[in-house]
Image (cartoon, helix red, strand yellow):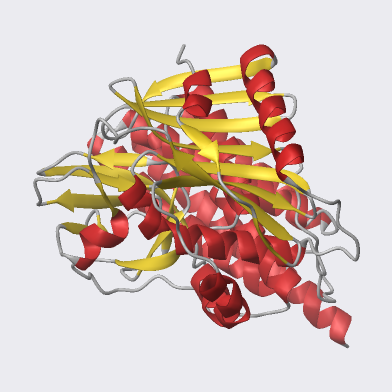
Amino acid sequence: MKKTKELFQLFTLGEMTSISNLTYFPLISKQNGPKHQYITLKEALEKKYLTIQEVSQAGTVNTLLAINQSPYVILITDGEEVTGAKQNRVMVTAILIPAQSEIRIPVNCTERGRWSSKFENSMKDAEFVHPPTFRYHKSQSTKDNLKSFHQFMSDQGKSWAMIDEYFEAFQQRSQTSAMNDLVTKSKKEFDQLLKETHCLENQVGMMVFVNGEFYLMDYISQPSAFSILFPKLLLSYGLESKLRLKETCTPINRSKAERSLEKVIQSLEKDVKDEIETESIGLGVDYRKQTKAYEANFLFWEDELICSTIYSKAVVEIPIRRRESEDPMMIEQVRDYIQHLRRIFIDLREMLSHHDTLRLDTLSREVEQLLERLASELQSHPKVAQLIEQTLEKIHHIRRRHYPTEHLDHLLEDIEYNLNQILRLLDSSRRSRSR
């Protein structure tokens, strides 16, 4: 078990900054310098040290290939996004990519409505980190999958649902349902926030309050790396705070911040409900801790804490202002889900031909999660729900190996037929309502 108490001995709280309902206290390093050196995703991509691309010409939705051609270790933080290639993706977990290496990195799609046929050499840095609520839910899903399947993967359907909620809350639309589009359109609203604030010397993180309540804390061991991540993180806090704006806020001062920090320390030391320690995708060890009030993620490298995020469980749901729709999930969203499922089936067929049982389990579980999400959104359509249930049963057969290998391809064809039937039923229902 990793000791996390050391995190709180690495910094002191600086002077607070407040804009509207957002307040943060900078974390100022008390160290002479970190033991390990690394560069950020932004630096690595800009200097062409790093290439992030599809794993193959066909591509795989939830995996990308990272090629580090430099002599430097590269830190990619949880929630950073890359754009381009077949569709935009967000990082599922924090990763340290070794120097001169190639590794596959787990991601979620953040652009449901696009799957390009092009094979681009490298993706680009999206210049933002996803908002805390999105990261929190993605983190919970990743932790659950690490416990159940010992794999770094996050519920793709849940990620899409969260992005839809952000679009609804900001009353925006995107042709491809791309989170990058929402952030790009919203950036101008936070120009003042980004201009009036700046990263301090030896700053290694921020303790963030919204409406006067502790929200989360981000920490990066290397001040030079944090200074590059600072505007990305600040933008994500700004997006979140706007959604949670209240007419009155609880007063916040340094004394309250110190008391909140002490509560976090005590909870993580004495109130642990769940914890999991796993070898990271790249260098180091991934360590996750859950208490009654907080969810915490840590990345260690040879016993040095490289980065961490601690969420208050107040970060559970964002305010929602749903558009009027005749279905809980719009028909266009259902089409996108099903199109995504079809892409996964291409991967499943490849796994069957190569007898890759581990990857087959991962993809099958991903299909189950997407179908379960569809079922929960389409409860008002009994026939559709019945078809989804039948499809889930077939997926269970694949995972449990109830069919001979040579019959599984026929099973996938049956599933494809069911998906087409779901679309026909929804189309028919919409046409009959419009008459």
Q: Is residue 221 visible?
A: yes
Q: Looking at the image, is 17 positioned above or below residue 140?
A: below
Q: Nearer the viewer, residue 132 or 231?
A: 231
Residue 92, position in %: x, y?
A: 45, 45
Quadrant in the picture for residue 229: bottom left
Question: Of residues 343 and 197, which is closer to you in this image?
Answer: 197
Q: Position of residue 269 (x, y in %)?
A: 62, 15
| 214 relative to 122 in the view: left or right | right
Q: Is residue 36 above or below residue 114?
A: above
For the question of whether residue 178 can be seen, the reply is no
| Residue shown at 9% from the left, 44% from the top | 100
319 versus 222 height, above or below: below
The residue at the point 40 percent across, 70 percent down is 115
| Farthest residue, direction bottom | 435
Q: Position of residue 176 (x, y in %)?
A: 52, 76
Find residue 196 and report its image quarter: bottom right
- What percent of the width, then of the height, locates residue 287? 46, 24
Camera-nearest residue between 398 and 272: 272
Q: How many marks?
A: 0
Q: Is residue 75 left or right of residue 71?
A: right
Relative height, residue 435 to residue 410 (above, below): below
Viewer-side residue, 423 vs 32: 32
Quadrant of the drawing holding the C terminus: bottom right
For this view, does 421 lie left or right of residue 124? right
